[in-house]
Amino acid sequence: MAANQNAMQTLSMNIKREYFAAIVAGSKKTEYRALSNFWERRIEPLKPPFKLRFLNGMTHPIPEAVVIVKRITRDHGAVAGMM
């Protein structure tokens, strides 16, 4: 199974510290983004499951977390990835 996860597509995005901490702690299971042309182009080619790589900060070492997105929904002008 580990080899299959390594073959998954990966999407990287920056995220604020408070949301990053909640995802790492396991209390935040959904991440939302506005359904803009930018995010539509990045998310549309991906089919779950895929890796979502969260980066928090710009100065090295950058805190990083990788989760597996199991489902994507589009609703009310936003896209949500469920982990």
Image: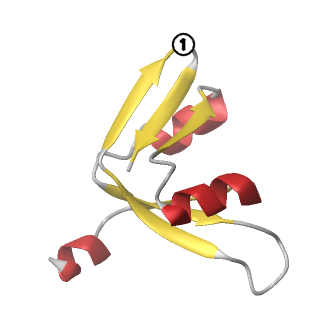
Residue at the (52%, 64%) spot, across then down: 25
How far across and how far down the image is residue 73, in percent? Answer: 39, 28
Residue at the (65%, 36%) spot, across then down: 38
Return the residue found at the far left: 1
Q: Is residue 47 left or right of residue 31?
A: left
The amino acid type, in three-letter code, at marker 1 is: His
How far across and how far down the image is residue 12, in percent? Answer: 57, 61
User: Which residue is nearer to you in this view: 37 or 14?
Assistant: 14
Image height of 30 relative to 24, above or below? above
Which quadrant would residue 32 be assigned to in this image?
Answer: top right
Residue at the (72%, 66%) spot, across then down: 56
How far across and how far down the image is residue 11, in percent? Answer: 50, 58
Q: Is residue 60 left or right of residue 31?
A: right
Residue 13 in view of the camera: no
Return the residue found at the far right: 59
Return the residue found at the far top: 76
Residue corresponding to mark 1: 76
Residues packed near mark 1 inside 10 Å, few (<14), some (14 to 19) or many (20 plus): few
For the N terminus, give its image quadrant. Answer: bottom left
Q: Secondary structure at mark 1?
A: loop
Return the residue found at the far bottom: 61
Residue at the (54%, 71%) spot, across then down: 65
How far across and how far down the image is residue 37, in percent? Answer: 63, 28
User: Which residue is nearer to you in this view: 17 or 50?
Assistant: 17
Which quadrant would residue 36 be assigned to in this image?
Answer: top right
Residue 83 in view of the camera: yes
